[in-house]
């Protein structure tokens, strides 16, 4: 007989793995950050719509003017979060992007102080210190011309926007169905980002089309190419370049030409939207049927571990000893938040945001 608690634990770990694969897929997809965000949101909204209809979940129930405004605001923050995260992946690599994003617990505490005048207690102060020290240790160099450092800055912007999203959801989405919130947020992201496709460097500029036969022959071709090319980036210890191409080489549209469609990138984009977003959110909601939000959050806080391990294995992004120490401090702060060892964590609840 199936044990509901064991199933919930498996679901929570599945969510952590799927969230951890987000950066990996962002590196494999040969589109720019804006295009990836638009495609991810489109696939995710479609998957969540099918799920809602199959389960007969009401998508319009309780969606009055106030909540509609909150959904619009949270959708905007989610779009910013995804764009900055994938910019971090393209510029600095998966590990740097993930660690920069993992700073979001510190930003949540700081935003609570700035916006709601909440006091920082000893536990929250410890968490802020851990994250700050961890970020100092994982910073490749303190030169803004360093590719890894720029990637980390994009990752921090991703963490800040996610913190805003978490607070927005925490204070404005209570009483709404989790699938309902996720659907409308993804739809808002798609509608906001689609007009931005191909507008310039923010999305990757003109770029170099990566659609030759070697790259589109099969969905696994980019993975093989990325693994071999990553080795060439190991010579410079502080240049944690993305595994496949520099950001400036990313294509700026979802279709690179009438005769050259990057089917492999479309495949990974569908996986990113359907599995790492739609399925992951569904599993997270499912895990909460037998786990409390604190336990589920503690497991999902392992996401950076999975992401860094996968990047090391697939792309050869071998972290230095200093980076490993810094990563451990950031992950420890995230776990402490998930365990509810800070006042903010105790108030967060189960649906702070749609994860990266």
Image (spheres, helix red, strand yellow):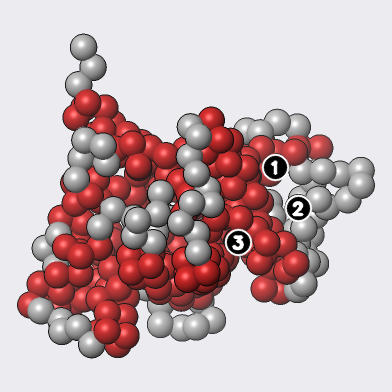
Q: Where is residue 86, by image quadrant?
A: bottom right
Sooner in the amino-acid sequence: mark 1 or mark 2: 2
- Foreground label between 3 and 1: 3
Sooner in the amino-acid sequence: mark 3 or mark 2: 3
Q: Residues within 10 Å of mark 2 (few under 14, many from 20)?
A: many
Determine which residue is flagged by label 2: 254
Marks 1 and 2: CB-CB under 8 Å?
Answer: yes
Can you say whether 129 is above or below 275 in the image?
below
Q: Where is residue 174, by image quadrant?
A: bottom left
Determine which residue is flagged by label 1: 266
Marks 3 and 2: CB-CB under 8 Å?
Answer: no
The residue positioned 77% from the left and 72% from the top of the image is: 199
Q: Secondary structure at mark 3?
A: helix
Q: Secondary structure at mark 2?
A: loop
Determine which residue is flagged by label 3: 188
On the image, the x and y values in percent for residue 38 come to 66, 57
Real-space Cα separation, disc 3 to disc 1, in angstroms: 21 Å
Q: Secondary structure at mark 1?
A: helix
Horizontal side of 149 relative to 223 (left or right) equals left
Q: Residue furthest top?
A: 1
Real-space Cα separation, disc 1 to disc 2, in angstroms: 8 Å
The residue positioned 65% from the left and 50% from the top of the image is: 42
The residue positioned 68% from the left and 62% from the top of the image is: 191
């Amino acid at each position: 007989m199936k044990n509901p608690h064991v199933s919930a634990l498996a679901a929570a770990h599945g969510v952590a793995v799927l969230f951890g694969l987000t950066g990996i897929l962002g590196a494999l997809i040969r589109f720019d950050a804006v295009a990836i965000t638009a495609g991810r949101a489109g696939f995710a909204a479609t998957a969540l719509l099918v799920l809602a209809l199959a389960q007969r979940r009401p998508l319009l129930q309780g969606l009055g003017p106030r909540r509609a405004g909150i959904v619009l605001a949270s959708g905007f923050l989610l779009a910013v979060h995804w764009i900055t995260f994938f910019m971090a992946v393209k510029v600095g690599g998966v590990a740097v992007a993930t660690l920069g994003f993992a700073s979001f617990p510190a930003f949540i505490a700081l935003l609570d102080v700035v916006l709601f005048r909440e006091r920082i207690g000893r536990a929250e102060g410890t968490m802020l210190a851990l994250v700050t020290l961890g970020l100092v240790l994982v910073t490749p160099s303190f030169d803004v011309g360093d590719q890894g450092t720029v990637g980390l800055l994009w990752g921090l912007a991703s963490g800040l926007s996610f913190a805003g999203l978490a607070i927005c959801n925490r204070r404005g989405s209570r009483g709404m169905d989790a699938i309902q919130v996720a659907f409308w947020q993804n739809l808002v992201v798609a509608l906001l980002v689609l007009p931005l496709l191909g507008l310039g460097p923010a999305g990757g500029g003109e770029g170099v089309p990566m659609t030759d036969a070697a790259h589109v022959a099969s969905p696994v071709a980019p993975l093989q190419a990325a693994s071999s090319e990553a080795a060439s980036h190991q010579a410079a210890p502080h240049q944690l370049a993305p595994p496949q191409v520099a950001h400036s080489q990313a294509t700026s549209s979802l279709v690179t030409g009438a005769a050259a469609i990057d089917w492999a990138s479309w495949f990974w984009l569908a996986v990113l939207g359907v599995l790492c977003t739609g399925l992951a959110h569904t599993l997270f909601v499912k895990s909460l049927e037998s786990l409390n939000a604190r336990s589920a959050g503690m497991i999902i806080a392992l996401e950076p571990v999975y992401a860094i391990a996968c990047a090391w294995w697939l792309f050869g992004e071998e972290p230095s000893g200093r980076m490993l120490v810094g990563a451990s401090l950031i992950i420890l702060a995230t776990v402490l938040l998930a365990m509810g060892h800070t006042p903010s964590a105790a108030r967060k609840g189960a649906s702070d945001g749609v994860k990266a």
